[in-house]
Image (cartoon, helix red, strand yellow):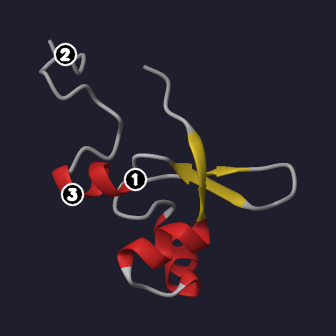
Amino acid sequence: MKIRYQTSSEEVARALNIKKESLHAHLSRNGHYFGLRPIKLPNRFLAWPDDFLERLLVGNTEGEKQNGEGGAA
């Protein structure tokens, strides 16, 4: 399943009850926000994975499959 990146930083910050600036500062310092990495759009905005909240809540930040098919041998 392909990950869709259509969620804006404003939407992520609102859902997490933080400021957009805090989200960007954490991303700048660490290169990710608790394991989540957005993509940079041609207009310089960031797009976050659509399932960001679910992935943060279950700790599945790298997009592994939930049923044990994550690729680890």
* Residues at discs 1 and 3 in contact (Cβ within 8 Å): no
Earlier-in-chain disc, 2 versus 1: 1
Q: Secondary structure at mark 3?
A: helix
Horizontal side of residue 52 vs 47, given as left or right: left
Query: What amino acid does circle 2 point to?
Result: Glu
Q: Nearer the viewer, residue 20 or 36?
A: 20
Horizontal side of residue 69 vs 13, given as left or right: left
Place of residue 1 in the rendered image (x, y in percent of width and height, measured from the top left): 42, 19
Horizontal side of residue 49 vs 40, given as left or right: left
In the picture, residue 34 is in which quadrant? bottom left
- Residue at numbered disc 3: 57
Give me the C-alpha separation between circle 1 and circle 3: 9 Å
Horizontal side of residue 64 vs 47, given as left or right: left
**Dot 2, crowdedness within 10 Å: few (<14), some or many (≥20)?**
few
Residue at 20% over, 51% down: 59
Place of residue 3 in the rendered image (x, y in percent of width and height, measured from the top left): 49, 32
Asked if residue 30 is positioned above or below residue 66 in the image, the reply reads below
In which quadrant is the C terminus drawn?
A: top left
Q: Nearer the viewer, residue 66 or 26?
A: 66
In the picture, residue 63 is in which quadrant? top left
Q: Secondary structure at mark 2?
A: loop
Residue 22's disc is none
- Residue at numbered disc 2: 69
Asked if residue 63 is positioned above or below residue 24 in the image, the reply reads above
